[in-house]
Amino acid sequence: MAGGSGTRSPAPVLWFTGLSGSGKSTIATRVHQELVRRGVEVEYIDGDALREVFPATGFTRAERDEHLRRTGYMASRLAAHGVTVVASFVSPYRESRDFIRSLCENFGEIYVATPLEECERRDVKGLYARVRRGEIRNFTGIDDPYEPPDRPELTLDTRVLSVDQCVAQVLAFVEDQL
Ligand code: ADP
């Protein structure tokens, strides 16, 4: 346990990773809402939202890594002060995710393992159609890599689990760490 008497113990960082359209933000948002309802001090951070604030963030490997290092560092500092963090980022590179893990005392890597075919079939944001029309390059899963986690704390396959079931699994995982 970090810190001594008078300081708060580190809170969990729940890091959702997976392809675009896999279900990360749908599940993460619901988990966040439920934690708020329970009175947990919690912050939700989302890759798309952060990119709107920092529009110059690109999609090369180096730019993605930098984006995640900054975000991961901030997440780890919030958690160190007792704020639970729910984070939803494609975060395609194992090395970047492992770096964030190394910063966080209590890191839960949640792999939303929806296969590409299903993400593309859903195409919630119409992005896959744009990729197929050649309007977007370096898209994770199509012409940019996604490296699945080796040992995620939790794997969710949204083809067989409902949103409610996914949310319940995450809450069960985090319950005794709050
Ligand atoms: P991401 O944040 O990974 O890009 P989204 O959460 O925006 O993905 O989109 C996932 C889509 O898949 C949503 O339209 C959601 O309603 C749908 N979906 C279907 N089943 C599930 C499930 N079990 N868990 C999460 N999302 C699901």
Image (cartoon, rainbow, N blue to C red):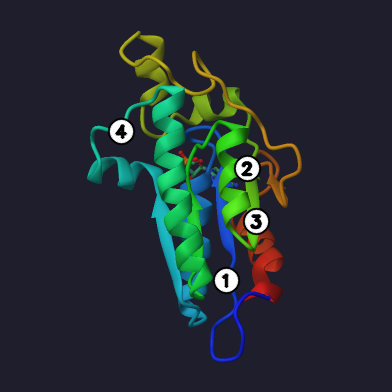
Q: Nearer the viewer, mark 2 or mark 1?
A: 2
* Amino acid type, mark 4: Thr
Kindly tell me whether residue 103 is visible in this rendering.
yes
Instruction: Say left or right for 8 vs 148.
Output: left
* Category of crowding for the residue at label 3, using alpha-carbon neighbours closer than 10 angstroms: few (below 14), some (14–19), many (at least 20): many
Q: How far, Cα to Cα, is label 2 from label 1?
A: 18 Å
Quadrant where the image shows the C terminus: bottom right
Beta carbon at label 2 within 8 Å of ligand 1: no
**Residue 103 image point, x, y percent:** 57, 54
**Residue 59 image point, x, y percent:** 38, 25
Q: How far, Cα to Cα, is label 2 from label 4?
A: 21 Å
What residue does disc 2 label?
Answer: 98
What residue does disc 1 label?
Answer: 11
What residue does disc 4 label?
Answer: 57
* Amino acid type, mark 2: Asp
Q: Earlier in the sequence, mark 3 or mark 4?
A: 4
Spot the residue most to the top: 134
What residue does disc 3 label?
Answer: 108
Query: Which residue is pictured at 57% across the width and 71% down the height?
Result: 11
Between 36 and 162, the one lying in front of the other is 36
